[in-house]
Image: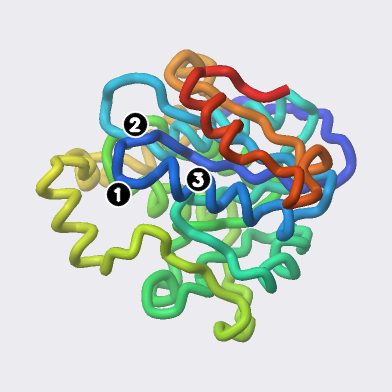
Amino acid sequence: MQRIKVNWIPLMTDVIIPYRDTGNGRAEQLARLLERLPSILEPDSRVYIAEQVDSKLFNRGLMLNLGVRAAFADGRGNKLVLHDVDLLPSPEMRLLYARSFANPVHLAGQWIGRYDCDPNYSGGVLGLSGRSFIDANGFPNSYYGWGGEDEAFSWRLRKIGLKPRRPNADPTRFFYDDMEGLSLDEKLTRLRDQKEKCMKKWELKKSWAQTWTQDGFCEIELFASLGRVTTINMDHHASLVDYDHSKIIADIKNGQPEN
């Protein structure tokens, strides 16, 4: 795998949100998350919303790769927070988001009863360095449909000697609200009914050791046309009073990324 070089500016937080408006309340969830983030992040932070534009099943890993690619293109991406759109951080989580993430931190591990059970799982919200993301070759680009890409990325991190840890903070203060509002069983039932699961998950898992250095961030340029990235500068939206998230949502739907 070719080592990717990035000229980073000083440590700044970049939040990467994989997104597609499927009609299941995603636009409303994104609006609520964007309304909350200015109070969570430092003023020099940026948010990259990577929206899938093709008609295939949602590919979360590919969208995360595209969002990170955009951050790197801006000379940023030294400190990443990979963030699902349906998880709303409590105000106190700003203290955890301010960490450096020299080692990966599974921030969503604060969701007790859902994401704190499997020590090898790192889905939901993950903080890590850009260097770690590159060395792991990012996410596989081959997971169309729900499930599997987080496990693959966790395996890649362990492959390079990194194991995401949990913050171990007070869960009554540091937590996430599940904006989707579904139990795991309800979510799995809906995914089956709507045929949104990744049907090649187990087949792909068998080839992790053979494909991880080829299928990933190193080939992201081949997939650049499959997503559209909107960039939001937090220093433009430090005040919630001035933060027009409804306009940003409209711009995303119209394919007009903010400058």
Q: CA distance from mark 3 to mark 2?
A: 25 Å
Give the alpha-carbon distance from disc 3 to disc 1, as whole Å.
21 Å
The picture places residue 205, in percent across and down from the top left corner, at 29, 46
Q: Which residue is mark 1?
A: 147
| Residue drawn at x 68%, y 27% as measured from the top left | 4
Kind of residue at disc 1: Gly
Quadrant in the picture for the C terminus:
top right
- Residue identifier under label 3: 30
Residue at the farthest left position: 193
Q: Secondary structure at mark 2?
A: loop
Residue under circle 2? 142
- State the SS at label 1: loop
Give the residue type at disc 2.
Ser
Which residue lies at the image location 49% right of the left edge and 19% below the top edge?
254
Neighbourhood count class around disc 2 (C-alpha, 10 Å): few under 14, some 14–19, many 20 upward: some
Q: Residue at x 60, y 70 (%)?
A: 90
Mark nearer the N terminus (3 vs 2): 3
**In this rendering, would 11 be left or right of 109?**
right
